[in-house]
Amino acid sequence: MSYDVVIIGGGPSGLMAAIAAAENGANTILLEKGRKLGTKLAISGGGRCNVTNRLPEEEVIKHIPGNGKFLYSPFSVFNNYDIIDFFEGMGVGLKEEDHGRMFPVTNSAKTVVNALINKLAELGVEVRMKTPVKTVHYDDNVHTIILEDDSKVITNSLVIAVGGKAVPHTGSTGDGYSWAKKAGHTITELYPTEVALTSGETFIHNKSLQGLSLRNVSLSVLNKKNKPIITHQMDMIFTHFGISGPVVLRCSQFAVKELLKGREEIPMLLDVLPNEYEDSLVQSILKSMEKNPRKSIKNIIKGIVPERLLEYMLTAHKLDVEQNAATVSKESIRLFVHNLKHFQFTINGSLPLKKAFVTGGGISIKEIVPKTMQSKRMHGLYFCGEILDIHGYTGGYNITSALVTGRLAGMNAAREAVLETGI
C-alpha cells in the first residue's frame, strides 16, 4: 500500500505529525505497535497531562537544557502559545498552574488524548494499531516500511516519531535508532535524564533518612573543584537507594553527565533552608537557648526542619537530643546550622534509562534541518520527539518539544510528498 506520508509512532510527536500532515493535504497513515495511542501522554503530569508551558519562549528554551536552542527556529513556525491555541481550538480548555504549567481544565489526560484521536478521525488519517515495524528500506524516490508480518507500506515521506528508551512500557524501546543509523544518522550517547540518583552514603544504607520528604530545598551538583554546576530549588525525598523528587530530577542530567566523564562519585550540596540566612538562624537559636536554658536542644530547634532530619543532624554532631540548651556550646550550634545550609554528600549513579522520565542523547540535531525537521542525510525522511537529542525538565517542556517538532515534521513531510506526487 502507498501513502503520501507515513508516521511511525503514536506518541505526542507522532499524533501531532499525523494531524499536521493530513491538514496539509497528504494521504496519511499512522503506524503504532501498541494497543493504544498517546500512552505516554496519558500518564504525563500524574495522569493530568501537562500539555505545555505558558512561560515566555526564552524561558521555555532555558528549561530544555539538552539542546533547547535548536528549537529557536522551530518556535518561529509553531511555539508553546500555538500549542495552547491548537488545543483550545479543538475544544480542550486549558488552565495555568504554578510555573506556567498548562493542564486541561478536566484534570484528565484522556481529554487531551481523545481530542487528538478525534482530530485524526476527522481528517481521515488511517490508523493501524498493533502494527510493529520490522525495518525500513530507503530508496532514491520512495521509502518502504516492512511490517512485522512482512507486508509493506510505501511512502514518499516518512516521519519517525517512536520516542527514546525512557518509560519503555509506553512503547519507547529505542526501535528508531537503528532506522536512523541506516539512513546515515549519528546517534549520540544515550543516558537517563529526569531520573532518581543513587548514593553509597552510610545514611542511605542504614536507612536513617529513608522516606523523609523535604520541602523547597536547594540542591546543587558540584564539579571537581567543588563549585556548583547547577542549582535548583524544589522538593526532594530520601529513598532506600539514594535521592529522588522534583529537585533531584532537575539536577539529575548534570550529575549523570559528570558520571559519564568517568567520575566515580559526584558531590551534591543540599541547603535545607535556602530562604534563611545562616547568621540570622544561628542568632535566633542562641537567643532561644538563653531564654530557655533548661529546655532540651531538640525542643529549642524543633520546627526549623523535619524531626527526623533534626535528630539525624544532632546525632551527627554528637549532640544528645535531650541535652539541656545550657550545656550546648555556641560553636556546636554554628556548626549544626552551617551543615543544615551545607549538607554535602555524594551520589554514585542513577536509576537505569528505563526508569528515567526522559532519554538524554539521540539523533544528532546537527543532521536535522531545524525549520522542517527533515533529515540532512536522506530525502523524504523526518524525525520528531524524544528520538532527537533534545531533552528538557519535567513541567511540560518535553511535551512542548515533541508537539512542536511533530507539527513541523508532519507539515513539511506532507508538503514534500505533495510536491513529489504533483498533487
Image (tube, rainbow, N blue to C red):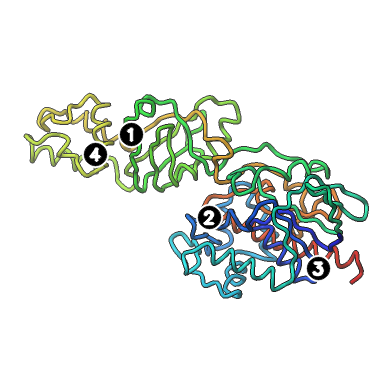
Which of marks 1 and 3 precedes in the sequence?
A: 3
Q: Within the image, what quadrant is residue 88 found in?
A: bottom right
How many numbered discs, if any?
4
Q: Residue at x 52, y 60 (%)?
A: 49
**Along the viewing direction, whichever of 78 and 326 lies nearer the viewer:** 78
Mark 2 near mark 3, Cβ–Cβ under 8 Å? no
- Residue wearing tag 1: 209
Label 4 – label 2 distance at C-alpha: 33 Å
Dot 4 amino acid type: Glu
**Along the viewing direction, whichever of 232 and 10 lies nearer the viewer:** 10
Q: Identify the mark at residue 44; answer none if there is no mark.
A: 2
**Along the viewing direction, whichever of 315 and 134 lies nearer the viewer:** 134
Q: Residues within 10 Å of mark 1 (few under 14, many from 20)?
A: some
Label 3 – label 4 distance at C-alpha: 62 Å
Residue 308 pos. (x, y %): 26, 36
Dot 1 amino acid type: Leu
- Residue wearing tag 3: 26
Q: Residues within 10 Å of mark 2 (few under 14, many from 20)?
A: some
